[in-house]
Amino acid sequence: MKDYSVYILSNSAAILYIGITSDLTNRLAQHRDHPDPDGFASRYNLHRLVFVETYPTAHQAIAREKQLKGWTRAKKLTLIRAQNPEWRDLSVDYMPPPNSILSGS
């Protein structure tokens, strides 16, 4: 069964981007590769995954994404701090290290 992730990316200035995906690892790689240089995440160099939730259905994930996008910035920051108080880059839990791809490990 496929899970759907609602995620928040940030940068050193704490600009926030909220997205949804059925393949978080691939989506994070896309954000890092900047396929759309005019996209919001590319323009603001949003690459740090600071929040993620998973849902069993796309409908639930979309509803949560819409809910989060409707929240105030302060409420979003409180949510992130509750799950990730140090604003650690959670993408290390979802993506292989860059060198492992080249070395085949």
Image (cartoon, rainbow, N blue to C red):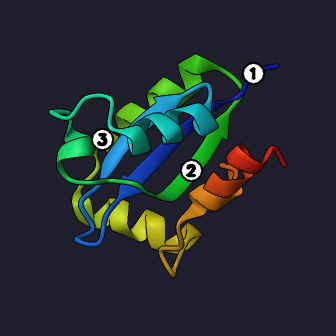
Q: Horizontal and vertical percent for residue 80?
A: 46, 65
The three-letter code of the residue at mark 2 reads Val
The earlier-in-sequence mark between 2 and 3 is 2
Q: Horizontal and vertical percent for residue 49?
A: 49, 56
Q: Residue at x 58, y 56 (%)?
A: 91
Tag 2, which secondary structure?
Answer: strand
**Disc 1 to disc 2: CB gap under 8 Å:** no
Disc 2 packing (10 Å; few <14; some 14–19; many ≥20): some
The three-letter code of the residue at mark 1 reads Lys
Q: Tell me where residue 76 sits by quadrant.
A: bottom left
Residue 62 higher or lower than 102, as above or below: above
Image mark for residue 2: 1
Real-space Cα separation, disc 1 to disc 3, in angstroms: 23 Å
Tag 1, which secondary structure?
Answer: loop
Q: Residue at x 67, y 56 (%)?
A: 99
Residue that badge 2 annotates: 52
The furthest residue to the front: 103
Q: With 49 as the anchor, is 102 left or right in this view?
A: right
Q: Residue at x 27, y 43 (%)?
A: 41
Real-space Cα separation, disc 1 to disc 2, in angstroms: 16 Å
The three-letter code of the residue at mark 3 reads Lys
Residue that badge 3 annotates: 69
Q: Tell me where residue 45 sits by quadrant.
A: bottom left
Front of the two marks 1 and 3: 1
The earlier-in-sequence mark between 1 and 3 is 1
